Amino acid sequence: MDYKDSGVDIEAGYKAVELMKKHVAKTTRPEVLGGLGGFAGAFDLSAIKGMDEPVLLSGTDGVGTKLKLAFEMNKHNTVGIDCVAMCVNDIACAGGEPLYFLDYIACGKNVPERIASIVEGVSEGCVQAGAALIGGETAEMPGFYPEDEYDMAGFAVGVVDKKDMITGDDIQAGDTLVGIASSGVHSNGFSLVRKVFNITAENLDRFHDNLGKTLGEALIAPTKIYVKALKSVKDAGVKILGCSHITGGGFYENVPRMLHDGVRAVIRKDSYELPALFEMIAREGDIAEEMMYNTFNMGLGMVLAVRPEDADKAVSAIESAGEKAFVVGEVAAGDKGVDLV
């Protein structure tokens, strides 16, 4: 008896590493020391010596039950983007630059081509974020996961000069709220989505005129990575006073996280066009509007607070980075929270 008899194929692991190397190579940065395959990823921090008070930032997250969609569609090269996005967007929210990323994939059976496809997505996410993929782990766990399923998570490290951190401390009544468009559901709320739609190949392959694509294509669209958009705002000379990544818990949980006591956000629901996908989810699931805004991003992946005189400049900077942006509301005096009007 050997390890393969127990369900763990070491040779498949070697092959998976070889297949993913070309994807990892796309993410390299000058600071990366060594290559793929060492026991630890190494990253040279000499460049941060130019900062007055460098602060390391970190983020970790997974993709959640959106993976069920990937299994059903047999499409695995986008969920890695989701995994990176969930980590690096949180770092960007604090004003940081993502430096490097590590992934963890656990599966019932190591199919090298599938693992390489997943890492292809991770690589693309890292390229979009400007982060290096410096390591990871693929764990084959027969009997723990079904052979055709897997789970994944990621961990990112970034840096910011303390004086450039986005803390929300300077937000005041009268400031303007700018929203950045999402690409769809992103990576939160899929447990509810799977209750609304019968996730079968037939339903996912059905084209919907109001979506302009199949339901599967609309749902699996990867999470937007906002690192470059936020950098563009900073490079335009705009001070971002507060930043909220609209993830699990929607608007009601995430927008107040950028506020301090004594101010609240007022977001106008008619300030941008609600994407058809969210209208479809609400209609098909008979979901109340408040629950929709308490679960999903509703078309806005990030909300920023800026001074009123900087609003137009911020929108232009975001759009110059290839994203859509809208003035969606303002900050008012009151108890910390959010009003959707």
Image: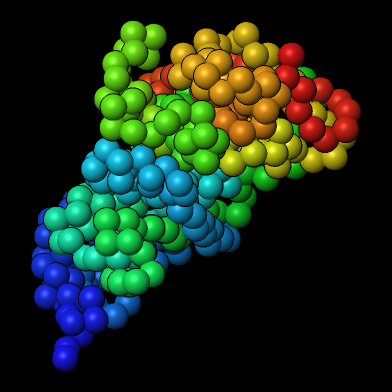
Q: Residue furthest bottom?
A: 1
Q: Residue at x 38, y 58 (%)?
A: 151
Image side of residue 30 versus residue 57, left or right? left
Q: Residue at x 60, y 10 (%)?
A: 271
In this figure, what is the number of numbered marks?
Answer: 0
In the image, residue 113 lies at what x, y percent? 14, 56
Q: Residue at x 32, y 28 (%)?
A: 204
- Report the front residue among 173 and 142: 142
Determine if residue 338 is in view: yes
On screen, 112 above or below 212?
Answer: below
Q: How is the image coloured?
A: rainbow
On screen, 329 above or below 141?
Answer: above
In the image, residue 235 lies at what x, y percent? 45, 33
- Report the front residue among 125 and 322: 125
Looking at the rendered image, the quarter that the N terminus falls into is bottom left
On screen, 180 above or below 341?
Answer: below
